[in-house]
Amino acid sequence: MDDSGLGAAGVQLLTARGERVEHPDFAISLTDDELRGLLRDMTLVRRLDAEATALQRQGELGLWASCLGQEAAQVGSAHAMAASDYAFPTYREHGVSWVRGVPPLDMLAMLRGVTNGGWDPNRYRCAPSVIVIGNQALHAVGYAMGIQLDGSQDAAIGYFGDGATAQGDVNEAFVFAAVFNAPVVFLCQNNQWAISQPTGRQTRTPLFERAAGFGFPGIRVDGNDVLAVMAVTRHALARARAGEGPTLIEAFTYRMAAHTTSDDPTRYREAVELEAWRQRDPIERLRVHLANEGIVDDSFLEGLQQESETLGELVRAGVRSMPDPEPGAMFDHVYAEWHPEIEAQRDEVDAYLASFVEEGVR
Amino acid sequence: MAGIDGHEPVTMTMAQALNHGLRRALERDAKTVLFGEDIGRLGGVFRVTDGLQKDFGEHRVIDAPLAESGIVGAAVGLAMRGYRPVLEMQFDGFVYPAFDQIVSQVAKLRRRTEGAISLPITIRIPYGGGIGAVEHHSESPEAYFAHTPGLRVLTPSDPQAAFDTIQQAIASDDPVIYLEPKRRYWDKGSVDASADPLDPAMAPYPWRARTLRVGSDVTIVCYGPMVRTCLEAARASGEVSIEVIDLQSLSPVDYDAIVASVERTARLVVVHEASRNAGLGAEIATRISERCFTMLEAPVTRVTGYDVPYPPNRLEEFFLPDLDRVLDGVDRVMSY
Ligand SMILES: Cc1ncc(C[n+]2csc(CCOP(=O)(O)OP(=O)(O)O)c2C)c(N)n1
Ligand SMILES: [Mg+2]
């Protein structure tokens, strides 16, 4: 156990140095292919994230909220899900949407400013990312209530951050999930910060302990340990499917980058903290473990490096050539049924823009 | 900033002017406290509260847990205990979790207690679009608040107005929704801090509209972020002489000022970023029709955002009224 603040309660299966350890309650046994798959996904997500950050700097994206350092919490939990389960992510869960199969350019479209969505949620069983803090926790609960009414074996996962645990919506989600015994998993990534505010500004108790007061179990897991996150999430999903109700998972991790590309973290946090967490990197520890076990070799890692480069190029080119929507697109899909005012305003915009063409101005 | 306390006007941005105004309010009254997300060490995401926690302490400039309903609800209690809370909502789109507290409690408590309890709460909200932001960061929610009896709604359009009105809002014994036009935060202007905005003899009354440009053919009524746009349009318009009125106070609205202008111009264009349906423009058009019906040469025209959710930022230039759209509105009333 290290001094990350994880504490004795924190479930860990892979130490920061990449040593495999056992836990009395949580075991996991994965095939070599599955293990390589986890390393691959985390590596590619990190590459995607770095590329998006660079594209924002170059003015190609309006904003980017980096998931750097949180790849294990996201990729591990999403890998525990079945295809028919449903994820409800925030703006930072690129690792989740990646594992759900959302194409990278679809993830970037919202930040490019060409859409407020980006993908068909039902196709990937992954809701559009939510920016208003905490809203989606209730959506996950309601979806899970629907699963329950259907008598189905599916489950839902609601993602949110440490800051979100202060919101009414998240606490209401806990109440509803508990009262209805809903098949939902709350996956809270405690990345230690909500913009400039440390977790201590949102809570005086460890977050996972909150669950007990609502009447369901809470588990803290080393959020930088992909194996532990996956094991714990599998356990929580199994409980949900078995009709045992909700679980809160606190994935203890760290936001290695700025809050978003608009943020300047030097105003509120110390570099030493970052350095300490760099030693607990989620990808490096899995790589060390897999290399020690002979599960990955240099040629695999080189191949992965190559694949990352290709992904970066694809994302770069794809974002740069992403077309702007037509002005009239803002009137699309506002209502399901015909709406006279929307159509009148769409015509108004068309006529207005056409008047410039006539004048030869635009 | 050097010079702000002297008698020479100082050039500064609207964000800096608000910062100075907040500083004055904190100095003036020990019961004034600032409460919001990331307003302390970070100084707010727009740096409007930059340095204030350092200078006034963590008990006066308080970083709140991430919960807007909590911030506003707790402010009601603080106010009942004699404090004068100045709240920051991080963005327009994040005030809605607090909407219940604002509409059900903040707006009504004075009336319910037959005046025994006043709520001198100021709720600062950066609002409006035009900064290329993602969803929920570009909204114009003013009509919800203007529609709610018991609230006052103010929005400054330049640094001097910001410096004065933020202090006036805080000093008001009524709850004030204080809407800061975020895309104008970085616009510079001269601020004369020598006059005390709380001295009625020295500063303009905040609840009155400001005529920023005199003209004879058309009156444009606007506020907040659209004021600069409308002034630019008025200057760009060749033959048509345009009068520009900055409402500044969206509740109450200074209808007398608009009527006095329309009595001379006989034509009115109302401009706002917010969606059109049931917006401020609708109310103003009605009032002016009621009071100026026989004088009008053309129906009151609105130039506004459309009745759609604020679009993704690659489309916002088509949603937001700009100089051309304002002049198109002017053309419509001129050629009616
Ligand atoms: C209701 C609401 N209030 C404020 C914000 C502005 N905001 C965006 S992210 C954020 C911090 C969120 O912290 P946390 O829940 O820990 O998630 P993290 O960003 O660390 O992933 C804030 C305050 C928001 N998006 N929604
Ligand atoms: Mg956080």
Image (tube, coloured by chain):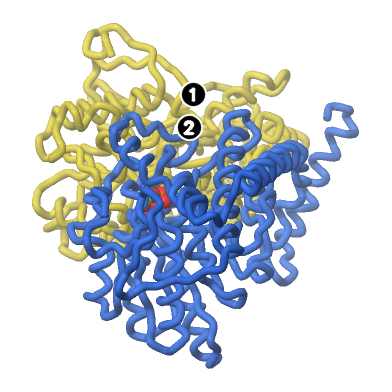
Chain colours: A blue, B yellow
Residue B143 appears left or right of A361? left
Residue in the foreground of this view, choosing between A176 and B171: A176
Q: Which mark is residue A162?
A: none
Could you say which quadrant of the image residue B53 lies in?
A: top left
Could you say which quadrant of the image residue A215 lies in?
A: bottom left
Which chain does the residue under circle 1 lie in?
B
Residue in the foreground of this view, choosing between B227 and A74: A74
Mark 1 neighbour density, 10 Å: few (under 14) some (14–19) many (20 or more): few
Q: Which mark is residue B246?
A: 2
- Residue at image coords 24%, 51%: A5
Q: Which mark is residue B212?
A: 1
Disc 2: residue Cβ within 8 A of ligand 1's nearest atom: no
Residue B20 shows in the view: yes
Mark 2 neighbour density, 10 Å: few (under 14) some (14–19) many (20 or more): many
Q: Does dot 1 land on a helix, a strand or a loop?
A: strand
Q: Position of residue B143 (x, y in %)?
A: 47, 52
- The quarter in which the C terminus of chain A is drawn is top right
- Residue at image coords 62%, 34%: A55
What amino acid is found at the position of numbered circle 1 in the picture?
Answer: Leu
Disc 1: residue Cβ within 8 A of ligand 1's nearest atom: no
**Image marks 2 and 1: residues in contact by CB distance under 8 Å:** yes
